[in-house]
Image (cartoon, rainbow, N blue to C red):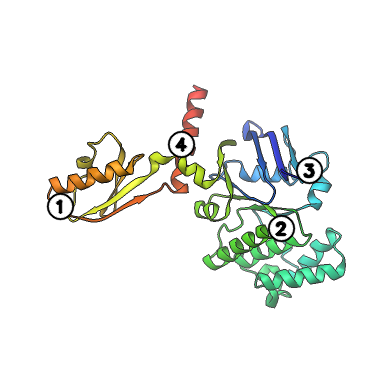
């Protein structure tokens, strides 16, 4: 199976709102595929379609080789899901939740016990296994959800904002486990609006806004396509006005950053020469000088803005 997830022209409407607008993409076997977008972009709706909770109005989606509409049971047997909102039973213990989910998937009792013990220990929940989930913290609930998603040994994991609202320690543990299970061969589809998380985890990223895909590529290639977002960051020994540095054709914009100046350009070497000459001319010293590649956040903002502008001109 070369494409564990294949989406073609997928569309979902809620009244007059188009939540997912003719989306198409493929996820490769064994990759962590990031679905990156602001709140309300269509991330959760897409996941709900791919996991058989919602039916699309148009288009097709295949997960683990099966049509999500025509064979939803076969799809669900092969996936694990960490939803946006916890679906653990709060009046059951962590152990009982895992036993229940294992039984629903038809996992033999011996394997249920072995897997539950293993996962609870890995996620630091074993000592709390007999406590009711109602008393769990947000981080503990999220770790339990990941344990539940793994009970049927799925081929594909769907994670909807898995670290949202977590403390730093819990978020780091969840990311480490995501990476570990990907190393073990699982394909992982993760939705997030956390740029750092996407950059750390994902092999490829789809940026979605207003239900449409703005770009799909590796973080590295997205950076290469946005080289005008590079910047030279300089600190002089005297304060200057940003307008004094605007007189060069290779400069896109100049932005103050604390006591430093960021000069955005697609040609940093030319700007470094310009800055050195500028300092000599003004009899100033350069205290620090750094060339910075565009961050994933810079690229995300750029693509989302471009997409909004294109939508504006299309509707006009």
Mark sitting on residue 16? none
SS class, disc 3 = loop
Dots 3 and 4: beta carbons under 8 Å? no
Number of the front mark, 1 or 2: 1
Check disc 2 and report the residue beneath it: 87
If you read the primary sequence from the N terminus, does the residue marked by circle 1 or circle 2 appear first?
Answer: 2
Quadrant occupied by the N terminus: top right
If you read the primary sequence from the N terminus, does the residue marked by circle 3 or circle 2 appear first?
Answer: 3
Dots 1 and 2: beta carbons under 8 Å? no
Could you tell me residue 80's position as x and y percent? Answer: 73, 55
Task: Estimate how packed mark 4 is, as few (under 14), some (14 to 19) or many (20 or more) residues with alpha carbons within 10 Å.
Answer: few
Could you tell me residue 119's position as x and y percent? Answer: 71, 69
Could you tell me residue 33's position as x and y percent? Answer: 62, 48
If you read the primary sequence from the N terminus, does the residue marked by circle 2 or circle 4 appear first?
Answer: 2
Residue 65 placement: quadrant: top right
Looking at the image, residue 156 sits to the left or right of residue 102; the answer is left
> Which residue occupies 56% across, 62% down?
166
Check disc 3 and report the residue beneath it: 65
Looking at the image, residue 42 sits to the left or right of residue 113; the answer is left
Could you tell me residue 273's position as x and y percent? Answer: 24, 44
Mark sitting on residue 305? 4
If you read the primary sequence from the N terminus, does the residue marked by circle 3 or circle 4 appear first?
Answer: 3
Q: Is residue 268 above or below residue 111?
A: above
């Amino acid at each position: 199976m070369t494409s564990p997830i294949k989406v073609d022209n997928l569309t979902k409407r809620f009244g007059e709102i188009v939540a997912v607008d003719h989306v198409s993409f493929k996820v490769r076997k064994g990759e962590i595929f990031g679905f990156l977008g602001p709140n309300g972009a269509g991330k959760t709706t897409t996941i709900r379609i791919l996991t058989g909770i919602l039916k699309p109005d148009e288009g097709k989606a295949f997960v683990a080789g099966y049509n999500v509409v025509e064979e939803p049971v076969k799809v669900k047997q092969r996936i694990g899901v960490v939803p946006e909102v916890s679906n653990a039973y709060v009046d059951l213990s962590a152990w009982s939740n895992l036993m229940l989910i294992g039984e629903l998937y038809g996992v033999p009792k011996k394997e249920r016990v072995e897997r539950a013990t293993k996962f609870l220990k890995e996620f630091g929940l074993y000592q709390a296994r007999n406590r009711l989930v109602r008393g769990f913290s947000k981080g503990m609930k999220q770790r339990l959800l990941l344990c539940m998603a793994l009970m049927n040994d799925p081929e594909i994991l769907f994670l909807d904002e898995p670290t949202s609202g977590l403390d730093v320690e819990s978020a780091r543990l969840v990311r480490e486990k995501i990476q570990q299970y990907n190393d073990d061969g699982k394909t992982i589809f993760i939705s997030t609006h956390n740029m750092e998380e996407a950059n750390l985890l994902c092999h490829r990223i789809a940026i979605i806004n207003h239900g449409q895909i703005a770009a799909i590529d590796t973080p590295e290639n997205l950076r290469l396509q946005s080289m005008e977002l590079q910047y030279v960051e300089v600190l002089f020994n005297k304060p200057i006005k940003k307008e004094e540095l605007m007189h060069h054709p290779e400069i896109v914009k100049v932005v103050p950053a604390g006591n430093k100046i960021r000069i955005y350009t697609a040609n940093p070497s030319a700007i470094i020469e310009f800055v050195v000459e500028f300092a000599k001319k003004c009899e100033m010293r350069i205290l620090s000088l750094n060339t910075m590649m565009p961050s994933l956040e810079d690229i995300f903002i750029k693509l989302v803005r471009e997409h909004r502008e294109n939508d504006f001109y299309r509707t006009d």
